[in-house]
Image (cartoon, rainbow, N blue to C red):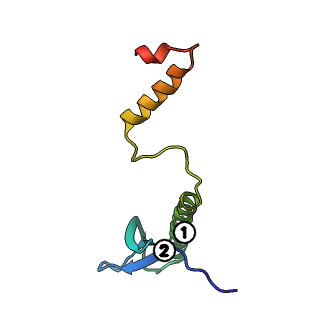
Amino acid sequence: MEKSKEPIRLRQRRMASGNTSLYLDIYINGKRSYEYLSLYLIPERTRADKEKNKETLKLADAIRAKRVVEFQNGRFGFDGGYRLDANFLDYYRTLCEKRHQNPESLGNWGN
């Protein structure tokens, strides 16, 4: 089976201190962006270092998987019902007018 291309990849970058920084390489609609995770792999000198790096990679992969799910949900129209970039006043006016259309409840309209 052919391996499909993922729009979000976990990448590593060697730092001057010897540690390795983990980040997400996001390539969507011809635009590339990076999300640095503030997670670092340390040089493996002991078993404890190896276990810590293993847990760090698991966490980074879980974050990557979460971003892929968020991307897929937005791509196929499964919105969460809210938008962070929406104007609050427009949203609030819409709610007020929707509530005002209900003749039994006029409480928020006057507020």
| Residue 16 horizontal side relative to residue 13, left or right | left
Q: Quadrant of residue 54?
A: bottom right
Q: Residue 15, how many percent across, how many down?
A: 33, 78
Question: What x and y, as percent, mark residue 55?
Answer: 55, 68
Residue 24 vertical position relative to residue 96 in the rendered view, above or below: below
Q: Is residue 49 above or below residue 101?
A: below
Q: Please identify the quarter of the rendering in which residue 72 is found.
A: bottom right
Query: SS at mark 2?
Result: strand
Residue that carries the numbered disc 2 in the rendered image = 10
Q: What type is the residue that disc 1 sits on?
A: Asp
Q: Residue at x 59, y 60 (%)?
A: 76
Q: Furthest-right residue in view? A: 1
Q: Mark 1 or mark 2, which is nearer the start of the sequence?
A: 2
Residue at label 1? 61
Residue 70's x, y, as percent? 54, 59
Dots 2, 1 in contact, CB < 8 A: yes
Residue 33 in picture, x, y percent from top left: 37, 70
**Looking at the rendering, in which quadrant would you find the N terminus?**
bottom right
Q: Quadrant of the C terminus?
A: top left
